[in-house]
């Protein structure tokens, strides 16, 4: 049997196995995995890792609704998804974040119109709930009917912070629809009080860390885990940054809760010792929750290795540089896969299989993305050919975001993608983008996916 495309002789890496094999692709799907396969086109993958396409579950591409919390981000759907493709990302999850008072369904439809016709890879959306009006919660079931099954809730920031009752009620609805509650967990009332006491020190690089200590995160994680336990909601805790939060997640998993933990790349690369140095290089790593001391980072790496934390995401959202100020917003969509290989696999913190699991397979499982995240016949032919010996120094010139700074400027990684395939189509090859804008598709999840595809998961 001849296939449209054969990836020949690569080292196939899955969450459970590592073996040499050919992969035969017919149309948009993986047809078979074996040896001696034939195809109309063959790509020689000897000496390369062949892994599932990376999935980034936490990306902020340009969205006017995110102001005033953020200046609209620099990367459009087209630019950001293309940058991700260079870094091996074949699917990402962005957000629809309607301001209070706006209809959720209308905002979701508007967000899709912003993406469709522009994205170069496949994408899904999470609905960010910002409204405490009880009537707004009545619109959530219609969101699930539109194949968006994850709902994000903030416990912090003006214009985003929800009260406990709203979070609890939303979790009840999410649980009833077998969805995913996504939480930004920080005790913002205590953070505001600590900021009030240090209002004159805001320009100090240590200000952010001192006004959002780890107890404000650990307490909030404990609280929403209690809500999720009572309501039965599946929950993903975004951007864990401290050992207190990790401890709470570990305890929740031990008692059988359906809880997942995310860590973002920047927390694994940097510690609070890097604040001053990065500002001097023209960018800031003052994200929320803050990047913390080295002992917290060590706890995050351990939790990622032992399964307490499940996925690594980018939280990609670089903003245009303002005159006289350092660049803001972390640019990680293109660097995530390579940085976790470099700092995780090469430095002995993660196995190759765990690297694939946290960057590729688990995000698909957590978000319920059908036919994504695994190298299995019948699944989408989203693949990355990764050269473990390729070295790249990360700079604004070597990356592809629409900014003049790089959040990891000057860091050299060993290992980088050399080809990216999305649904059987080569879109990045030999350092060139060869795909086309608008070829990416919205991914339906939940019942909307299942009724159209027997392989779909919920």
Image: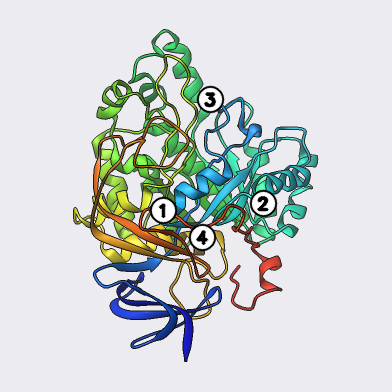
Q: CA distance from mark 2 to mark 4?
A: 24 Å
Q: From what the image shows, is residue 322 above or below residue 96?
A: above
Q: Nearer the viewer, residue 57 or 89?
A: 89
Q: Nearer the viewer, residue 335 or 369?
A: 335
Query: Disc 2 vs disc 4: Cβ atoms closer than 8 Å?
Result: no
Dot 3 lies on which element? Answer: helix
Distance in Å between CA atoms under marks 3 and 2: 38 Å
Q: Residue at x 25, y 63 (%)?
A: 351
Of callouts 4 and 3, the N-terminal one:
3
* Spatial separation of the CA atoms under disc 4 and disc 1: 31 Å
| Front-most of residues 69 and 130 | 69
Which circle, 1 or 3, is nearer the viewer? Answer: 1
Name the residue carrying label 2. Answer: 116
Give the number of the mark in front: 3 or 2: 2
Q: Is residue 48 visible?
A: yes
Q: CA distance from mark 1 to mark 3?
A: 48 Å
**Residue beneath the point at 58% across and 30% down:** 72
Q: Residue 257: tell me if it is visible.
A: no
Label 1 crowd (10 A; few <14 / some 14-19 / many >=20): few
Location of the C terminus by quadrant is bottom right
Q: Earlier in the sequence, mark 1 or mark 3?
A: 3
* Crowd rating for badge 4 (residues with CA inside 10 Å; few <14, some 14–19, many 20+): many
Residue that badge 4 annotates: 366
**In terms of depth relative to the viewer, which is nearer, 362 or 340?**
340
Mark 1 → mark 2, Cα distance in angstroms? 23 Å
Question: Where is mark 1, residue-wise?
Answer: 432
| Side of 199 where 47 appears, left or right | left
Label 1 near label 4: C-beta < 8 Å? Answer: no
């Amino acid at each position: 049997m001849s296939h449209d495309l054969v990836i020949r002789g690569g080292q196939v890496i899955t969450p459970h196995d590592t073996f040499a094999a050919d992969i035969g692709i017919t149309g948009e799907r993986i047809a078979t995995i074996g040896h001696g396969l034939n195809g109309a086109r063959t790509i020689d993958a000897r000496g390369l890792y062949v892994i599932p396409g990376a999935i980034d579950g936490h990306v902020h591409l340009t969205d006017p609704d995110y102001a005033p919390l953020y200046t609209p981000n620099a990367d459009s759907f087209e630019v950001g998804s293309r940058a991700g493709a260079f870094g091996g990302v074949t699917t990402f999850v962005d957000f629809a974040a309607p301001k209070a008072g706006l209809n959720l369904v209308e905002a979701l439809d508007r967000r899709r119109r912003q993406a469709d016709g522009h994205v170069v890879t496949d994408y899904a959306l999470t609905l960010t709930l910002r409204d405490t009006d009880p009537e707004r919660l009545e619109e959530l079931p219609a969101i699930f009917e539109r194949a968006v099954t994850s709902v994000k809730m903030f416990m912090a920031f003006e214009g985003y912070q929800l009260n406990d009752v709203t979070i609890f009620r939303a979790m009840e609805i999410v649980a009833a629809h077998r969805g995913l509650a996504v939480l930004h967990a920080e005790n913002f009332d205590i953070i505001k009080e600590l900021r009030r006491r240090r209002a004159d020190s805001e320009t100090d690089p240590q200000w952010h860390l001192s006004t959002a200590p780890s107890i404000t995160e650990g307490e909030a994680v404990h609280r929403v885990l209690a809500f999720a336990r009572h309501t039965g909601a599946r929950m993903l805790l975004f951007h864990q940054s401290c050992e207190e939060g990790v401890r709470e997640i570990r305890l929740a998993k031990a008692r059988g809760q359906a809880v997942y933990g995310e860590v973002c790349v920047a927390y694994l690369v940097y510690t609070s010792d890097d604040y001053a140095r990065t500002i001097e290089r023209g960018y800031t790593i003052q994200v929320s929750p803050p990047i913390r001391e080295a002992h917290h980072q060590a706890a995050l790496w351990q939790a990622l290795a032992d399964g307490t934390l499940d996925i690594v995401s980018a939280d990609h959202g670089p903003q245009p540089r303002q005159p006289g100020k350092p660049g803001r917003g972390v640019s990680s969509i293109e660097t995530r896969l390579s940085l976790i290989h470099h700092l995780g696999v090469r430095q002995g913190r993660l196995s190759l299989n765990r690297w694939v699991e946290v960057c590729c397979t688990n995000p698909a499982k957590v978000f319920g993305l059908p036919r994504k995240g695994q190298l299995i016949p019948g699944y989408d032919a989203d693949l990355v050919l990764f050269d473990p010996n390729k070295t790249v120094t990360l700079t604004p010139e070597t990356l592809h975001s629409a900014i003049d700074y790089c959040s990891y400027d000057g860091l050299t990684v060993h290992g980088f993608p050399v080809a990216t395939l999305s649904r059987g189509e080569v879109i990045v090859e030999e350092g060139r983008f060869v795909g086309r804008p608008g070829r990416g598709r919205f991914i339906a999840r939940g019942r909307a996916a299942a009724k159209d595809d027997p392989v779909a998961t919920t």
